[in-house]
Every structure is written in C-alpha cells, then in structure tokens.
C-alpha cells in the first residue's frame, strides 16, 4: 500500500500546520491565538506496533554521484559538477525532486562514456584479474560480478550477470576487449540500480540495503569496504551493530561535509550566492560576500568539530572566524590582517551563533536595508517548522518607504503592520524580527538607525514554550536553544534530510524516538543522525 | 478573409479552394499538423509589469491594436507586430490557488496546474506544461522540445507531469552542442553513426532495467522512473533520427563560456540570450525541434541588467510603488529590454523561410506571460500576456482583448493546445477552465 498525497494531510503534524495557517488569517475576525504545531512528544502516536511509511526511491544527488564515482573507479573528475539539472522543493536530496530530465540523462550518458573510456585504460587493474592467466570470458564474468556488486551496491542476480555477459559477447567481435568492457562499465553507470538507491527487501531491508542507507546518510557515497564486509557477514542485523557503524562513519571527513551540508541547507545559507545589495548603500558587500560564506562554513565546522553540532552552541556561540576584509568592513575589529580566516571571540551581549552571522543576516534582508519580516519568517519557518501563508493574493505588497534619516526601519515596518489585513500574520513574524534590528542589511552591528537609537525590543507570539517579550538576538537565541518546540523542529529538519522526504503520520514513532535520543544525547546533530539509524523507518520499508 | 499567411498555408495543404474551411478545429488539425510544420515558443518571465507602461488604452473589451494609438513604452518594441499579435488582458493565474504567486509561478505559469506546496519553501509541479503538451501532440522534430533560459537558479518552469521537471539550459553553447552535433558542418558521419549505435545498445539495456525495476515499485517511485524512461526515449528518438548531410545553417557559438557564472560575475548576458534565440530559430529552420521555452528569471531570484547601466535586480525594482530614485524608470527599462528581445525573436522568425512556404513566424506562436500582473503587488489578475504570431493562421491576431479577470489563464492554455492540434477542452486544474478563449479565427 502506498500513500496518496491526500492521506499525507491526515498527519497530525500536517493538520497542525494547516491549523496555524488558517488561524493566522482567521484571527482577524475571531481573535483566537494560533494553534501551535504538535511535536512528537505530545503527539498521540505511540511506539507500539511497527509502523513504516513508504520509503522513497532516491536518485543519487550530484554530490553523491561524484563521491560514488570516486570510490567506485578512483576517478575524482567529479563529472556531475557539469550536469544541467533543476530542483523543485525541499532539501537537495529530496527524492521527489530528484528526477532525470532529458538533459540529465544526456549528462549521465556522456559522463558514463568518458568515465568508462578512462577506466579501461588500465584494463587489468579494472578487471581485477589477468585475461592472459585466467582466460578472457571467465575474467570478464568475474569482473561483472565484482564490479557489478559495487556499482549496484548488492550482488547481481544471475540474469543480470547473464545480460551483461551477452552484452559483452555481442560487443566483443566488433573490436578490442577493452572496448567491450568499456561498454559494460558505461552501461552499468547508467543503470537505474546505480543511479538510484534501489531497495528490494520485503519489509526488512537486506544487509546490503542497510549498508547503503548508512553510507549515503553519513558519507554521501557508496558503502566502504568495511560496510560491504559487515553486510556480507551479517553484522548489520541489529540496532547496536548499525549504531556501531554509524559512529565509525561519523569520524570520516565526508561525514563532516555531510553534516555541514545539512546545516547549510536547513538554514538556507546556500542562498547567499544569489544575494545582491544596492551598491550605493552597501558598496563593500560584493567584496566581502565570499568571506561571509567562508566565515559561516568555519563557524559551523567548528560547532561540529568541538561540540558535535550542539544546538545551543549553534544558536548562541560567540566565536567566529574572520579575516581582514570582514574585520574592517563588517565587524569593525582592529588587529586582524590578511585574507586567512582566524578565530575571534565576539561580545556575547551582541552576537549569538549562526543567528548573527553576516551571511544569514545578509540573506534575510533587503538590498538596501534590514528586514524584520524576513528575519522573523526565517525563525518561524526554519527554527519552529511553522508554515506561514502567503500574503492575500491581491494585497498591495510594497516594500517599505525607503530608508530615511527621520524614521527607523522599525518605525517604518510598524506602520506597515498596522494594516489589519496584514497584521494577523505579521505579528507572528515582525515582532521576532525586531530583535535583529541591531544588525543592518549586511549584518553589521549598529546602535542607531533613522536618526535614533536602536530599539530591539521584541516579542514571540504563537509558540508552545517561548511566548513573551525579550530584547535582542542573544536573548532570542537563548530562548530558541531552550525550546522543546525548536528541538522538535530540528528533529524534523534532520528527518527530511536523512530520509529524503517529508515526514508522514507513519513516521511519528521514528520522530519521537529520534527526539528522545537527541535530547538524551546532549542535543547534538551527530547524535541526532545516529538516532535516525535506530528507528524502524531506517531498517524497514514498504 | 484570410491573411496572406493563412492563404499560403492553405495552399500548402491543398485546401485553398475550401474558403469555408472552419479553421483548425480539434479532430481535423492533428492530421494537418503532419502536413505542415508549426512552431511554438513559451517565454515565462518573473515580476510582472508596471500596468501604466504596458497596457494600451482601450475603450472596449475587444479592439484592433491598430486603433489604440501610441503603444506604451514596454510594448513599443513590438510596434511592427501590431497586426501579428494578441495582447490579452484580464486573465488570472488562478492555478496558484492562494499560494505565494512568485513561488507558484515556477509551477503554474505554463501548466495551469495547482502547485504541490507540501515540500516547504519551493513547490512541486503537478501537471504538464503547455509546451510539453504541444510537443506531445505534434510528436515532431529530432528533439521533442528545447528548454533554455537565464537567471533560473535551477528552478524549473517546464514540467512533463507531476514532479517531473525539465531544467532550462542556461549556457547557449551547451544547447548548441546538444542540438547541432549531428548537423554542424564538418561532422564525421561514420564516427557519429558508430557512436550512436553504441549509445543505443546501452540505452536499450538501461530501459529494460528501468521497466523491470518499475514493476516492483509503488506509485510515487514509478512516476520518477517513468520520467527517467521518457528521457531515455527522447535520446533514443534522436539517435535513430536520420543523420543530416550537414547542410543546416547554424549560428556562431560565443567565445568559451565554460566558466560562465553570471551570478557572481556577470558575463555577456545580452549576447547569451541573443544566441539562445538564434539557436531556436536555427533549430526550427532545420526541423531539429518545433517547441522551445525561454525562462527569464525564477521565483524570488534576481535577473540583473548591468548592460543597461544599473546594478539593481528586477525583483527589488519591481516592488516600487511610487517612483523613488529612478527605480520605476529602471523597472520599465528592464521590461522594455525584455520586449525588445521578444521582438528580435519574432523578427528573426519572420526573416527565416519556412521549408513549406512563407516564414517560420507565419507558422509560429510565441506565448509570453509573467506570474503576476503588477510588479509591486502579488496580484494574479491582469497577467501581461502576449501571443506573437498566429500559429499557422489559427489565431485572430491584431487585437487587444480584455477578459475582465473573469477567465483564468488556463483557458488561453486550452486555446494554445487547440492551435497545435490537441482537442483538449481543459488544461491544468479543471475547476479553473471554462473552455478556449474566443481568439481563434472563426
């Protein structure tokens, strides 16, 4: 049985999101507070009988493709970086979005041909046996089995071996043996069993499928030799063995890259490359944008390296990494010279983790000024996992009056919020966003705006455990870091990344289990990812 | 009365005597479309228009474009096409169904199908786009369709069906190589044939594996594999296409664009768009494809126009209500530049002979729309829609019509589908459809 999209809406969580949306609009009439999202711990779903949502057939992402090619062939040419592709919704590894367009199929074809042509240049090494010693056909058959197993990430079926042998036989008379092997390799690299993570296990995944899920979750690549060996010898049979492998994989530099990618996509930091600022207002932006990206990568990497990706460090940490352009143009800090990034401690009374990174603040701002709406919306959607409806279809959506010497951004935004058509939803965003008013449109700290001192008094509405007034980003960050609602949201974001799909009601138990492990593991992203491997959703499919 | 183009066309299919021939009606057209080639271009762009600078003044809901006086500045580049275009006001992008119109635009502009908004900040498409429907109906050309564009940021506007999106290729040199590899002068036909045969055997094996795998999977997964299979079939179609004798005139590639990243370092944007359009014209002339899209921008992303002398992106410029610091001027200037490009494409098509008589333009329609009506509101009313060309005599051009926002743009998509031989009576989300618009010749 597969779920139709209609059934997804019966999800407790999905229902809660819709309730929020409806009430955010409807409150104008009835004055009700918005419903809040139900988290896993408060959901009615309990972990009794095993429930597994339909797993998704996942095409390799381009990162996964490049990594897999490097591991399979030792070819680090990263051909996928030249593929033309488009993306729809969700994380970049969302299965629904990973389709194969004609242009991409052409890319796969051309890459497979090139990779195979390179690979057969050292034929004996590729084949793993000597045609002279063993005979051509036995050697090739052995190759089909051994290379096929690594390409398909499972042993080939007998008829699959036969089909490839037949292909070899028909290609062989026309030319050299290496040309015939080249065709085999190029075909395997376009096989759906290579390009997708196909799973055939009934209910319980096969050991090879568990190995594959583990390796792509942490390494974004095919299983390494140790995972293959564990699959062969039946050492991926229970949760403890899976956890053991998960922790081993976490030590790989590739796992660090994976967790960085998760943070970066969850927080929308990839958007920085498309951000443009008005040169007249922010002439320095085009120079420092690339360093902002490097700064945030270094910050997130350090949170992983030193704190296993702890949520509170991510949100409140006062260390960052800057070079001379960032020091002089953004932070106003003396004594940092050169282009190399170096660690500095910032004033924790002003700065708070990723929330005050200039990259994030530049993304969530307008070309010529800050933007409390976008900053509030970011907190609401990415950190609270709440979905806000778009403005009414025919509303006149003007950007605010231009920056002025007489009125602060806050004052101008408050005027805009006084319109009753808008205020229903905007009170969920703007009063959070005002906490960020100490930072301008490119993330520089400021004490004055529009001719007066900064007012960063802020307020949270419609949360489960954070409502109330506060002041500035550091206090917001502390509230967020201590909020169960935020912690549950992180679990959901992690789930979507780990499983390549949006959660469904059948995943409530997995989310609940993962949440408990996340909390008891010190709220670290590394433990969260391990926790996902311990769920039924990871080990079973339907 | 028939236009000269219409008469030429009727002559071409041996129907000139049939003066009362009722036009390309569903059912009749499909057979005809085999006999004469038609072409279609869709141009979706983002961030609407400034109404005062776009809409001609009209005193009635259906007037001749010749009667509206001077064209407003954005439309002025199309002055020479007054008789050859439809300016259609009062159509709604109803399919966005209350979701964010910018984001929905990527999904709905060409499809009329409501977006699947369950995936977060961006939406998934739920139905085919009009270009794909036309390509499917015509089943013609070496490439069923060709997708290009600029500033798309990898967000598609072309969908073959639910979740099945086709990227716009931005680097025109890549499209050049895709389309003209087999027809460009100097191609070694023997080598090409050997390469084709090899690819065919690989793809044959891959197809069989996909089919076998698909049988064991559930619906959602099968949809993805079907999309993959469609792509493989499109390549196979091309590989079995007769190798041309290298007689097709092709445009000239731009100097190496391999590292061409306009996001950080704007390259020759205007030159790239011009080459994309030249490629479309050449591909039509050589019958390499008959359907093309040009996607300009993407939801919440920012086309820039440094060659016009300003650095601001179209999105912030579009949001200005009152003129400030020349923003409105720049917004109008950028949109005028867009329309200059549309005029260039139409002019090139007009100047290129159709193999069966007349010009390519006589057999074409260029459908232009944006996702919103007004840059600074999110209104889905009054989409700035143009149809350039009469699609081989199908449309009654030369008119400015206003549907008073009583019709969804789905109905225009129905008319376009009909113009190319599809008998469709709805397109996209059925509840928004009332039937084709009264824009065909009677």
Image (spheres, grey):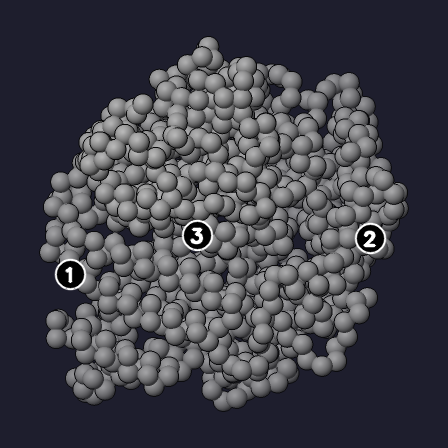
Q: Which mark is residue B427?
A: none
Q: Nearer the viewer, residue A327 or A363?
A: A363
The secondary structure type at the circle numbered 1 is helix
Q: Nearer the viewer, residue B275 or B224?
A: B224
The span from disc 3 to disc 2 (Cα, nearest Å) is 38 Å
Q: Is residue A399 left or right of residue A278?
A: right
The span from disc 1 to disc 3 (Cα, nearest Å) is 31 Å
Residue topped by disc 3:
B160
Q: Nearer the viewer, residue A348 or B306?
A: B306
Q: Position of residue A3 (x, y in %)?
A: 60, 68
Q: Are marks 2 and 1 in contact (CB under 8 Å)?
A: no
Chain under numbered label 1: B
From this viewpoint, is residue A304 visible?
Answer: yes
Residue topped by disc 1:
B194
Chain under numbered label 2: A
* Residue A173 versus residue A28 in the image, above or below: below
Residue topped by disc 2:
A35
Q: Residues within 10 Å of mark 1 (few under 14, many from 20)?
A: few
Q: What residue is rendered at 54% in x and 78% in y?
A: A210
């Amino acid at each position: 049985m597969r779920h139709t999209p209609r059934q997804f809406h019966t999800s407790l969580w999905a229902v809660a999101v819709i309730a929020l949306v409806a009430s955010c609009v409807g409150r104008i009439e009835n004055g009700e507070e918005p419903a809040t999202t139900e988290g896993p711990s408060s959901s009615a779903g309990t972990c009794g009988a095993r429930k597994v949502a339909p797993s998704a057939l996942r095409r390799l992402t381009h990162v996964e493709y490049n990594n897999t090619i490097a591991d399979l062939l030792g070819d680090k040419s990263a051909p996928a970086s030249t593929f033309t592709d488009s993306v729809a919704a969700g994380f970049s590894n969302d299965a629904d979005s990973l389709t194969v367009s004609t242009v991409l199929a052409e890319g796969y074809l051309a890459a497979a041909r090139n990779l195979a042509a390179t690979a057969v240049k050292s034929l004996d090494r590729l084949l793993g046996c000597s045609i002279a010693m063993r005979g051509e056909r036995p050697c090739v058959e052995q190759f089909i089995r051994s290379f096929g197993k690594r390409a398909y990430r499972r042993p080939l079926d007998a008829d699959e071996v036969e089909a490839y042998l037949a292909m070899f036989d028909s290609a062989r008379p026309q030319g050299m043996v290496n040309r015939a092997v080249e065709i085999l390799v190029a075909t395997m690299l376009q096989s759906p069993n290579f390009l997708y993570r196909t799973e055939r296990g009934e209910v319980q995944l096969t050991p090879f499928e568990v190995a594959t899920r583990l390796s792509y979750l942490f390494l974004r690549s095919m299983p390494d030799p140790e995972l293959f060996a564990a699959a062969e010898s039946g050492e991926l049979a229970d949760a403890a063995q899976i956890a053991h492998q998960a922790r081993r994989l976490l030590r790989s530099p590739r796992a660090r890259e994976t967790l960085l990618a998760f943070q970066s996509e969850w927080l929308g930091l990839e958007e920085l490359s498309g951000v443009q600022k008005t040169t007249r207002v922010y002439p320095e932006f085009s120079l420092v944008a690339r360093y902002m990206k490097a700064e945030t990568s270094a910050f997130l990497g350090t949170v992983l390296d030193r704190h296993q990706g702890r949520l509170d460090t991510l949100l409140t940490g006062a260390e960052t990494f800057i070079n001379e352009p960032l020091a002089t143009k953004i932070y106003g800090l003396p004594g940092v010279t050169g282009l190399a990034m170096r660690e500095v401690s910032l004033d924790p009374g002003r700065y708070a983790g990723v929330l005050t990174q200039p990259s994030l603040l530049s993304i969530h701002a307008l070309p010529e000024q800050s933007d409390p709406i976008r900053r509030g919306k970011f907190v609401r959607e990415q950190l609270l996992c709440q979905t806000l409806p778009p403005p009414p279809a025919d509303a006149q959506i003007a950007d605010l009056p231009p920056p002025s010497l007489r009125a602060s951004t806050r004052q101008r935004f408050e005027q805009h919020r006084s319109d009753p058509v808008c205020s229903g939803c905007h009170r969920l965003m703007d009063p959070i966003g005002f906490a960020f008013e100490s930072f301008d449109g490119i993330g520089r700290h400021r004490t004055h705006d529009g001719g007066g001192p900064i007012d960063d008094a802020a307020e949270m509405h419609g949360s489960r455990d954070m409502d109330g007034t506060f002041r500035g980003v550091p206090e917001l960050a502390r509230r967020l870091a201590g909020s169960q609602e935020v912690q549950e949201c992180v679990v959901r974001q992690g789930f979507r990344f780990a499983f390549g799909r949006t959660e469904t009601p059948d995943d409530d138990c997995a989310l609940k289990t993962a949440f408990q492990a996340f909390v008891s593991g010190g709220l670290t992203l590394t433990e969260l990812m391990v926790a996902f491997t311990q769920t039924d959703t990871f080990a079973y499919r339907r | 009365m028939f236009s000269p183009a219409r008469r030429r066309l009727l002559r071409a299919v041996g129907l000139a005597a049939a003066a009362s021939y009722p036009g390309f009606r569903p059912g009749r057209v499909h057979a005809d479309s085999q006999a004469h080639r038609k072409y279609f271009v869709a141009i979706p762009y983002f961030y609407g228009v400034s109404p005062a600078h776009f809409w001609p003044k009209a005193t009635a809901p259906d007037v001749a474009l010749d009667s509206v006086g001077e064209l407003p500045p954005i439309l002025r580049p199309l002055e020479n096409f007054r008789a050859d275009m439809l300016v259609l006001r009062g159509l709604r992008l109803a399919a966005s169904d209350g979701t964010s119109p910018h984001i929905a635009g990527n999904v709905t502009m060409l499809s009329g199908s409501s977006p699947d908004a369950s995936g977060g900040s961006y939406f998934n498409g739920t139905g085919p786009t009009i270009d794909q429907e036309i390509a499917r109906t015509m089943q013609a050309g070496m490439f069923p369709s060709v997708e290009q564009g600029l500033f798309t940021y990898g967000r598609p506007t072309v969908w073959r069906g639910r979740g099945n999106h086709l990227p716009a290729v931005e680097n025109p040199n890549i499209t050049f190589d895709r389309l003209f590899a087999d027809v460009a002068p100097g191609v070694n036909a023997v080598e090409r044939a050997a390469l084709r045969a090899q690819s065919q055997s690989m793809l044959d094996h891959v197809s069989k594996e996909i089919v076998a795998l698909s049988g064991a999977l559930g619906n959602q997964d099968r949809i993805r594999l079907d999309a993959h299979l469609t792509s493989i079939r499109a390549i196979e179609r091309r590989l079995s296409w007769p190798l041309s004798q290298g007689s097709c005139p092709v445009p000239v590639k731009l100097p190496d664009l391999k590292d061409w990243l306009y996001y950080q370092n704007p390259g020759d944007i205007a030159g790239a768009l011009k080459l994309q359009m030249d490629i479309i014209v050449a591909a039509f002339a050589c019958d390499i494809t008959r359907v093309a899209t040009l996607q300009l921008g993407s939801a919440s992303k920012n086309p820039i126009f440094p060659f016009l002398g300003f650095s601001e992106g179209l999105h912030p410029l579009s949001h200005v209500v009152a003129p400030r610091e020349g923003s409105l001027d720049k917004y109008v200037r950028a949109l005028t530049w867009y329309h200059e490009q549309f005029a260039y494409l139409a002019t090139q098509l007009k100047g290129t002979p159709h193999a069966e008589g007349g010009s390519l333009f006589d057999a074409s329609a260029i459908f232009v729309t944006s996702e919103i009506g007004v840059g600074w509101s999110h209104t889905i009313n009054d989409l700035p829609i143009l149809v350039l060309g009469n699609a081989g005599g199908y449309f009654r051009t030369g008119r400015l019509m206003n549907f008073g926002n009583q019709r969804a743009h789905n109905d225009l998509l129905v008319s376009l589908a009909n113009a190319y031989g599809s008998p469709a009576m709805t397109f996209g989300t059925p509840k928004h459809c009332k039937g084709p618009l009264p824009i065909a010749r009677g």
